[in-house]
Image (cartoon, helix red, strand yellow):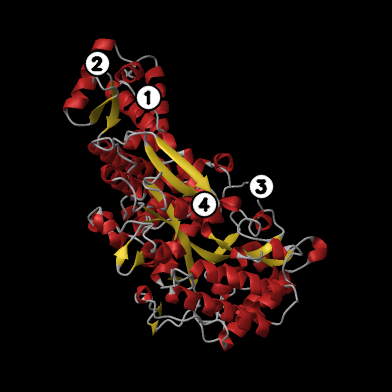
């Protein structure tokens, strides 16, 4: 999805609670001052309101602008402004090398006070004015329920010391909705960091190629790179990424705040190689209204899923039962690995532990591929059954193509990463908006439901010049902070790697997807073992995507697809170990 698409879908609920408070207080101040001219302007409140608006919108605010917004005489406003600077509510940052020109920024104390006031205003408005008849019960619940006790995450704060990187901060990213949101917010992040940001965006395959090519250069062209989680082992073994414990104190990241599966997936050989920037499990999207009309319950097993797909499949009326990644190569390869997981089997012979499979030993390279197995055959036959209830162009559908027809009302169910939810959640014309339920993958016999974790982490190239590492770390911490993650959600992202953000009342009001994913994590359904991050995983995924595509086209049998995929994958593992 392009940045323009994200902006087009930006809904009123995506605006922060802070900005709503600013707008409300401005309007209330205007009304009070208009009552027969009996009320005088409050220059402090007016200037704080203007400063907060500028901070939230990522605009540079000067002292002159604040004085103009005060509605008070110049001398009075200037004196009040200096009082707020002296009291620590407002911070000044030099705009030029001479230090004669300053920009104004809210301090941490002001941000905290403003957030507390925003929460109180919400509560007071609910207590004294009540909710409108027929208002959404979720809103009432959050005003007076459990999450009122959860502290809202404040907005991003300007770094006390701006980063000083020659040429600005250089970022290599993936072209998905979350990173597009980050790009749309570039001006605000530039204000936060105090430097320009240059972001290059690529598709998944080109991103991997560019990251590998960058590692061959004497000095990295990028300060931070986005890394698909299954690449971690390969990038660590090839020396593409710097272990973060060489550059920072890992405890500063608050590891316990990250979803366990996403945090574990960013490690290789017990060391952290990146910070999760988006944790986006693949889940089952399903139309709650269509299920209710047909008298169906949400599927928890593969048999129930196939029954629902058959019931809702009605091609003559333009409705198909289900869509999934079935395009040849990388897309279908991911589906094969996840289908294996649906039947309780990893792609490797991993030791079984409580809640899943153990992956800590993978850096020892003592693993083998497990494709041609009884569970593998059940997974292959399941995909052939899905084919019966899929749209006619399913064998060319990949990441975005499977969700677009779901968003337009042509598909009843779709496997999809949560990062794709903006296609229907933020599109008021979509029949799926406010009618979508989110489930982990339904499980096969004797297996448990899983939501295979996908997404990206942000890491530092191993060949980054030493004089840029400290600023790269500071920037990395900002991009992956709870404050930044909340900001992404407020501007259209539907991914989140942190528990604190998922429990933020503002975030939970935006979409049911955050609470659903949080619940999956607590139930140990979020798992990264379906796509273990070994160095050979990219090739194995490609092999599965080729051989199973031949099967789905009817050229070879399921047994032959399993045998061929197993043989080719074994050869890759053997080749890597002999070099």
Q: From the image, state whether disc 3 or disc 1 is nearer to you.
A: 3
The residues tagged by marks 4 and 1 sit, at their Cα atoms, a distance apart of 29 Å
Q: CA distance from mark 1 to mark 2?
A: 20 Å
| Residue 10 coordinates in the image, percent (x, y) | 54, 41
Q: Residue furthest bottom?
A: 374
Q: Is residue 12 above or below residue 24?
A: below
N-terminal of the two: label 4 or label 2? 2
Q: Secondary structure at mark 2?
A: helix
Residue 136 numbered tag = 4
Kindly state the secondary structure of the residue where label 1 is placed.
Answer: helix
Mark nearer the viewer, 3 or 4: 3
* Percent coordinates x, y for residue 322 in the rendering: 67, 67
**Distance between mark 3 and mark 2 Cα atoms:** 49 Å
Q: At which x and y percent is residue 59?
A: 40, 28
Identify the residue under disc 3.
429
Dot 1: few (<14), some (14–19), or many (≥20) neighbours within 10 Å? some
Res 420 seen here: yes
Q: Pick whichever, 224 or 450, lies toward us.
A: 224
Q: Earlier in the sequence, mark 1 or mark 2?
A: 1
Q: Is residue 256 left or right of residue 132?
A: left
Sequence order check, earlier mark of 3 and 1: 1
Number of marks drawn: 4
Q: Secondary structure at mark 3?
A: loop
Q: Earlier in the sequence, mark 4 or mark 1?
A: 1
On the image, the x and y values in percent for residue 16 come to 42, 41
Closer to the chain start, of discs 3 and 2, is 2
Among numbered discs 3 and 4, the one appearing first in the sequence: 4
The residue wearing badge 1 is: 29
Identify residue for label 2: 78
Q: Are marks 4 and 1 in contact (CB under 8 Å)?
A: no
């Amino acid at each position: 999805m392009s940045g323009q698409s994200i902006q087009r879908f930006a809904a009123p609920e995506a605006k922060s609670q802070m900005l709503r408070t600013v707008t409300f207080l401005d309007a209330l101040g205007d009304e009070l001052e208009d009552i027969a001219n009996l009320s005088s302007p409050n220059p402090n409140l007016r200037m704080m309101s203007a400063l907060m608006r500028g901070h939230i919108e990522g605009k540079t605010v000067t002292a002159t602008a604040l004085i103009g917004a005060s509605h008070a005489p110049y001398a009075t406003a200037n004196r009040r402004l200096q009082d707020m600077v002296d009291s620590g509510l407002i911070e000044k940052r030099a705009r030029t090398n001479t230090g004669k020109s300053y920009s104004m920024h809210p301090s941490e104390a002001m941000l905290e006070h403003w957030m507390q006031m925003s929460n109180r205003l919400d509560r007071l408005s609910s207590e004294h004015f009540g909710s409108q008849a027929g208002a959404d019960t979720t809103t009432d619940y959050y005003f007076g329920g459990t999450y009122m006790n959860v502290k809202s995450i404040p907005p991003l704060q300007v770094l006390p010391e701006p980063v000083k990187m020659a040429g600005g901060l250089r970022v290599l990213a993936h072209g998905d909705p979350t990173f597009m949101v980050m790009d749309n917010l570039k001006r605000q992040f530039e204000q936060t960091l105090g430097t320009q940001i240059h972001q290059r965006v690529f598709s998944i395959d080109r991103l991997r190629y560019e990251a590998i090519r960058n590692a061959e250069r004497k000095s990295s062209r990028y300060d931070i790179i986005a890394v698909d989680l299954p690449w971690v082992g390969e990038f660590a073994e090839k020396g593409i990424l710097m272990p973060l414990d060489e550059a920072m104190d890992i405890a500063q990241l608050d590891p316990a705040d990250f979803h366990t599966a996403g945090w574990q997936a960013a490690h290789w050989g017990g060391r952290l190689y990146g910070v999760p920037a988006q944790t986006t499990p693949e889940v089952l999207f399903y139309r709650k209204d269509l299920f209710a009309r047909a008298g169906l319950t949400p599927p928890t097993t593969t048999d129930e899923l196939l029954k629902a797909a058959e019931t809702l499949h009605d091609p003559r009326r333009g409705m198909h039962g289900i869509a999934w990644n079935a395009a040849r190569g990388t897309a279908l390869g991911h589906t094969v690995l996840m289908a294996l997981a649906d039947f309780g089997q990893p792609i490797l012979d991993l030791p079984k532990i409580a809640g899943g499979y153990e992956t800590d030993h993978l850096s020892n390279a003592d693993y083998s591929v497990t494709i041609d197995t009884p569970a593998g055959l059940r997974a292959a036959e399941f995909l052939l059954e899905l084919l019966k209830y899929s749209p006619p162009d399913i064998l060319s559908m990949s990441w975005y193509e499977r969700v677009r027809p779901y968003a337009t009302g042509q598909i009843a169910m779709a496997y999809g990463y949560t990062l794709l939810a903006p296609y229907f959640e933020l599109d008021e014309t979509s029949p799926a908006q406010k009618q979508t339920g989110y489930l982990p993958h339904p499980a096969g016999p004797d297996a448990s439901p899983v939501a295979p974790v996908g997404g990206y982490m942000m890491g530092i190239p191993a060949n980054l010049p030493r004089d840029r590492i400290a600023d790269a770390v500071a920037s990395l911490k900002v991009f992956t902070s709870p404050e930044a993650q909340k900001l992404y959600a407020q501007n259209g992202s539907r991914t989140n790697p942190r528990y604190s953000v998922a429990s933020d009342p503002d975030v939970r009001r935006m979409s049911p997807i955050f609470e659903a994913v949080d619940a999956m994590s607590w139930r140990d359904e979020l798992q990264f073992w379906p796509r273990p991050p070994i160095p050979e995983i990219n090739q194995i995924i490609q092999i599965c995507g080729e051989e199973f595509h031949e099967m789905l086209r009817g050229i070879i049998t399921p047994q032959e697809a399993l045998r061929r995929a197993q043989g080719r994958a074994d050869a890759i593992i053997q080749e890597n170990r002999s070099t």
